[in-house]
Image: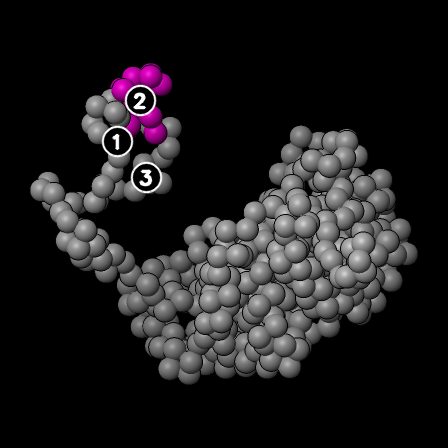
Amino acid sequence: MYTPHTKKDKEEMLKTIGAASFEELVKQVPAKFLWPKINLPAESLDEAQAAARMAGLAAKNCRPLSFLGAGAYERYTPAAVKAITSRTEFLTAYTPYQPEASQGTLQAIYEFQSTVSALYAMDCANASMYDGASSFAEAVRATVRVTGRKKIVYSAGVNPQYMDTLKTYFAHSPEYTYVKVPMNNGVMDQAALPALLEGAACLAVQTPNFLGLIEDMNGVADLVKKAGALLVAAADPVSLGILAAPGEYGADFAVGEGQSLGLPLAYGGPYLGLFSCKKEHVRQMPGRITGLTKDKDGKRGFVLTLQAREQHIRRDKAASNICSNEALCALAATVYSALYGPEGLKELAEANAGAAAYTAERLSSIKGCSLKFKGPFFNEFVLSVPGKAAALREKALARGVDIGLPLAPLFPELGETLLVCATETKTEADILKLEAAIKEAI
């Protein structure tokens, strides 16, 4: 195993930056976030020996059977997705500033935009964003620019991480106000909307919401428009195989997390922000947009267009300071969506709904457990449990099963509950193993 820096090199670098040791250099980082030193033998190892040693250490990692969701979902990704995205012309492609040399990349982005627009039933989509949270925050920011208002109304069921990201955007602007629409049986209390929407820039809602429950969006857009506000809707793209798309119920901006579309679970990403809107708001879209045009010979071509980003126009006129996109992740989502197609996506969504429903049926039959809410849900649901949810989870983890996310830290009003998720990857045997693990933990 070769490392280029000798002990002397390291000492010279530390001396130059004024640190006595590497430990001193990272002392501001809490110890719990630092990797422990890997216990390697003092003698030199050849490549095969080093690989065998590292494989042995890696085998000690525990990968439990997981029923976690909360915005990041375990799904099966067809092998073709990785095969295509691993091709060098995609894997090594950089920013397509020169269209004459970047037609393949630009076409891939254009197909992605078309896919997102179709999924969300919206007029326009951009080339993607960092993740669902940044898409959500940028959409809300756009409503502030359009309306000139600084009151943001949001459903209590919105992913808490999305709200944290949004508030970070406006952290230095105390004039912005945030008004939460309370829950009624786990979903947005629509009766409270008329009063809360007065003077608002937008209503931001997520469906299925963070608790997995499907919001009833009938008539919501009318209430929002009556107040002179705009509607921002966040939606899981897989759920749109069977649920109404945001454009169908009048959303002005529709966003989501694209991780479900062919991207693996990972420690923090990279994930994929989906961003779409109605045509009248196209100039409010951040980042890049690829357009279809014709060259001087009349042949089809692709170009970057309508870039309201700070690299291309005056900074104070820019819609956003985000200047990048997740092109390779967007390609994976495009390939994944094309492989499934509309009918395949519908079957996938039905499989997810069926797995979650069967899981809920099994777990709610356990003595002391029950569904917290009775409304329709997708992918995940809230389970009330006897005793401390966090303690039950720890006990089950020791048996190799992660039974779900304890909700008390995020939603104290829900009591001792778990957010349990089951996607198409969970078999009947997996679900019965989950049931057994919870029974044993109790």
In which quadrant is the N terminus drawn? top left
User: Looking at the image, do the residues carrying marks 2 and 1 touch, with CB atoms under 8 Å apart?
Assistant: yes
Above-or-below relation of 163 to 361: above
For the residue marked with disc 2, what is the amino acid? Met
For the residue marked with disc 3, what is the amino acid? Leu
What residue do we see at 57% from left, 75% from top?
339
Residue receiving disc 3? 34
Q: Is residue 401 left or right of residue 325?
A: left
Q: Quadrant of residue 119?
A: bottom right
Magenta residues span 12-26
Front position among marks 3 and 1 = 1
Q: Quadrant of residue 55?
A: bottom left
What residue do we see at 62% from left, 58% from top?
104
Residue receiving disc 2? 13
Q: Where is residue 127 in the image (x, y as percent from the top left)?
A: 67, 53
**Does dot 2 land on a helix, a strand or a loop?**
helix
Q: Where is residue 166 in the image (x, y as percent from the top left)?
A: 65, 44
Front position among marks 2 and 1 = 1
Assess disc 2: are there few (<14), some (14-19) or many (≥20) residues with their C-alpha within 10 Å of its C-alpha. few
Q: Is residue 353 left or right of residue 404?
A: right
Q: For residue 5, which numbered disc appears in the image?
A: 1
